[in-house]
């Protein structure tokens, strides 16, 4: 179940961040769902191009990119602008966000498929107004170490003595708060009921 998450925020101050920027295409060759974290925002994160299997330590980091800045080390919440996760439908994008340690994303709005893929990983994507996102960004600028709480149950983000309202599609919110975001896990939990129903079906019992 996901009710709240508290952590440090990394601000991605860009609109229309697409899935190719989140997880570049050259890293999609693997059929596994592991190892994508170090390549999150790869083209922005490094000054030279990267290839699968390359040691990130061998590359020159871009000192201006937010995830390379010491003050945002250990961040677990992304703060973005409008249309986050647009572009292709690649599932590797939210997987990379999750593997990099991020547990929530706050933005003005999200691309539909990215939103769905994130929800099935248990990553809440919540919406806030441009003005309220600016308030959070200003607080982070003043104090990068400030802890921010994303409260899906209460539909608010709290930081210091301030808070802003957030919204989220009710179906996604219900799935997260009640622990029903993992479709495979829910199916496994319901296996006894599946077996009971199957035993009553003559074409399966034969």
Image (cartoon, grey):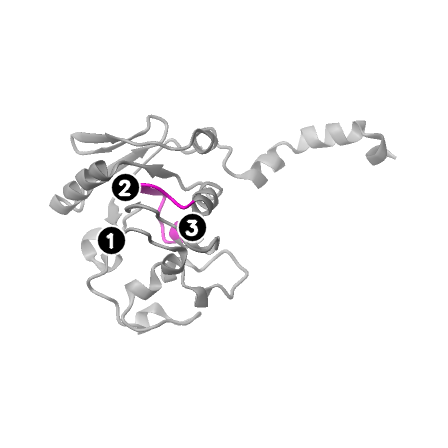
List x then y, in percent, for residue 162. Answer: 17, 31
**CB of mark 2 within 8 Å of CB of mark 1?**
no
Residue range highlighted in magenta: 97-111
- What number is the disc on residue 94? 3
Circle 1 packing at 10 Å, graded few (<14), some (14-19), many (20+), is some
* Residue furthest right in the image: 206
How many marks the image carries: the answer is 3
At 19% from the left edge and 43% from the top edge, which residue is drawn? 137
- For the point 33% across and 26% down, the residue is 154
Q: CA separation, marks 3 and 2? A: 18 Å
Residue 72 lies, in percent from the top left, at 22, 52
Q: Residue at x 44, y 47 (%)?
A: 114
Horizontal relation, residue 43 to residue 70: left or right: right
| Residue for badge 2 | 7
At 47% from the left and 28% from the top, the residue drawn is 178
- In depth, the one of 136 and 146 nearer the eye is 136
Report the residue marked by disc 1: 73
Badge 2 marks a residue whose secondary structure is strand
Answer whether residue 148 is magenta in the image: no
**Viewer-side label of 3, 2:** 3
Front-most of residues 24 and 58? 24
Q: Of label 3 and label 1, which has the lower sequence position?
A: 1
At mark 1, the secondary structure is: loop
Q: Is residue 156 above or below residue 91?
A: above
Helix, strand or loop at mark 3: helix
Real-space Cα separation, disc 3 to disc 1, in angstroms: 19 Å
In the orientation shown, which residue stands out farthest toward the left?
142
Q: Earlier in the sequence, mark 3 or mark 2?
A: 2
């Amino acid at each position: 179940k996901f009710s709240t998450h508290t952590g440090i925020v990394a601000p991605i101050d860009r609109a229309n961040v697409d899935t190719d920027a989140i997880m570049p295409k050259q890293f999609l060759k693997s059929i596994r769902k592991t190892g994508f974290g170090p390549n999150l925002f790869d083209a922005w994160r490094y000054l030279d191009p990267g290839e699968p299997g390359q040691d990130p330590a061998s590359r020159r980091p871009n000192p201006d990119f937010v995830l390379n800045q010491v003050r945002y080390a250990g961040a677990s919440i992304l703060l973005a602008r409008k249309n986050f996760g647009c572009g292709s439908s690649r599932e590797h994008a939210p997987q990379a966000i999750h593997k990099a340690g991020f547990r929530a994303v706050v933005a003005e709005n999200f691309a539909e498929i990215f939103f769905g893929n994130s929800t099935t990983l248990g990553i809440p994507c919540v919406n806030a107004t441009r003005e309220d996102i600016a308030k959070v960004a200003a607080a982070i600028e003043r104090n990068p170490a400030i802890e921010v709480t994303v409260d899906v149950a209460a539909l608010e983000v709290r930081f210091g003595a301030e808070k802003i309202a957030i919204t989220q599609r009710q179906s996604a919110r219900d799935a997260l708060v009640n622990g029903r975001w993992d479709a495979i896990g829910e199916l496994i939990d319901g296996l006894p009921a599946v077996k009971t129903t199957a035993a009553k079906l003559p074409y399966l019992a034969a």
